[in-house]
């Protein structure tokens, strides 16, 4: 809440709008293979006329966040701003849920749509991770599972980098995400969600790129992560906002960032609030993935970022 971290509590923010229409939709996703179609169904459920923005919340363990984002983009394209995040349960990887129609539900996605010209939404996303080791090539991958890097078993190579920390996988994998770079030099970060010792593969919180694309291991320090959060806040387009109008900020930070920040966790929240300025209130949560637009305007899944969504009404 604002600049403070509250553990083991339910944090709530009540938003009241004078001129803005809002609509909520929840969709069940029986299996992660259904994530793309569920994303399409979710987006299709909203009336398109006047739809300005969509804020999406999802179960973080049973849904493929990449496919979910792709399904939403298939319907809405870049015409509607889509942000949001996937629920996390710290680094336990046991149960995540969303509150759907007053009930805690796994295998569900929910979204709130905002309508009209009075609502304004700005977003920003920043990382702060640095490359560690050489750039390598993906040689075998499918969906969100990485099997081989440079022809070697992915998990074996990953463990060599982690050393003693490999004993704590998959939780310690949150400290060492990977950077993916496609043929258009567009990059994204992916975080470890699980491992398969038998297949020597790594399961990520978002889809891999096809074989032939580049991958690099990453690490960070608390100073760089705080600077990444500050960068996310600087990306916000707040020029149209009158300081007399209340501003709501929803901060979604990857749980892996908190493991690095440790006692400096609140520093990234303070950096954001300082830029948001007077009249801003902030709420948020730690996630297994963040949803925010790419340069093209279409939403995509991000990992290990601080992703901000700000709302105000004119």
Image: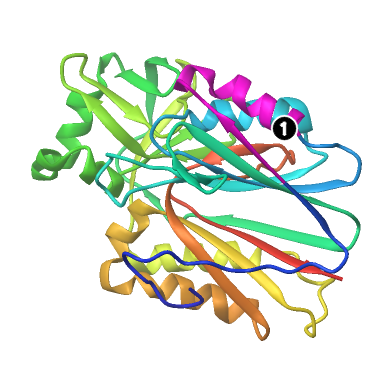
User: x, y percentage for residue 244?
Assistant: 80, 85
Write down the region rendered in magenta. 24-45
Nearer to the camera, 4 or 198: 4
Above-or-below relation of 272 to 81: below
In this figure, which colouring scheme has been used for the structure? rainbow
Nearer to the camera, 261 or 212: 261
199 on left or right of 275:
left
User: x, y percentage for residue 138?
Assistant: 39, 20
Q: Residue furthest front?
A: 102
User: x, y percentage for residue 247?
Assistant: 70, 74
Above-or-below relation of 65 to 173: above
Q: Residue at x 48, y 28 (%)?
A: 64
Q: Quadrant of residue 190?
A: top left
Above-or-below relation of 137 to 102: above
Nearer to the camera, 282 or 268: 282
Q: Residue at x 53, y 30 (%)?
A: 66
Judge the density around disc 1: few (<14), some (14-19), many (≥20) Cα neighbours within 10 Å.
Answer: many
241 on left or right of 273:
right
Q: Residue at x 37, y 69 (%)?
A: 223
Nearer to the camera, 83 or 152: 83
Above-or-below relation of 232 to 134: below
Q: Residue at x 91, y 40 (%)?
A: 49
Quadrant (top left, top right, bottom left, bottom right) of the C terminus: bottom right
Q: Which SS class for mark 1?
A: helix
Q: Is residue 17 magenta?
A: no
Q: Circle 1 sits on which residue? A: 43
């Amino acid at each position: 809440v604002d600049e403070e971290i509250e553990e083991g509590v339910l944090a709530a923010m009540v938003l009241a709008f004078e001129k803005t229409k809002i609509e909520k939709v929840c969709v069940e996703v029986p299996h992660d293979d259904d994530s793309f179609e569920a994303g399409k169904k979710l987006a299709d459920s909203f009336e398109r006329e006047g739809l300005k923005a969509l804020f999406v919340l999802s179960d973080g363990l049973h849904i493929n966040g990449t496919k979910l984002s792709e399904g939403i983009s298939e319907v809405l394209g870049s015409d509607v701003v889509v942000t949001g995040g996937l629920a996390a349960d710290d680094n336990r990887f046991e149960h995540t849920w969303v509150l759907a129609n007053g009930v805690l539900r796994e295998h569900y996605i929910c979204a709130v749509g905002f309508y009209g010209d009075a609502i304004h939404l700005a977003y920003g996303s920043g990382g702060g991770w640095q490359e560690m080791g050489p750039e390598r090539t993906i040689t075998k991958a499918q969906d969100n599972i990485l099997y081989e890097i440079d022809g070697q078993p992915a998990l074996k190579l990953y463990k060599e980098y982690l050393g003693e920390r490999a004993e704590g996988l998959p939780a310690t994998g949150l400290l060492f995400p990977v950077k993916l770079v496609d043929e258009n030099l567009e990059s994204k970060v992916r975080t470890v969600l699980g491992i398969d010792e038998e297949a020597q593969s790594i399961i990520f919180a978002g889809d891999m790129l096809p074989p032939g694309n580049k991958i690099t291991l990453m690490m960070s320090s608390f100073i760089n992560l705080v600077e990444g959060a500050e960068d996310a806040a600087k990306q916000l387009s707040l020029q149209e906002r009158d300081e007399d109008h209340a501003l709501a900020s929803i901060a979604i930070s990857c749980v892996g960032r908190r493991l690095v920040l440790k006692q400096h966790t609140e520093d990234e929240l303070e950096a954001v609030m300082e830029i948001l300025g007077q009249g801003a209130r902030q709420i948020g949560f730690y996630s297994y993935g963040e949803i925010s637009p790419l340069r093209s305007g279409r939403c995509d899944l991000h990992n290990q970022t601080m992703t901000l969504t700000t709302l105000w009404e004119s």
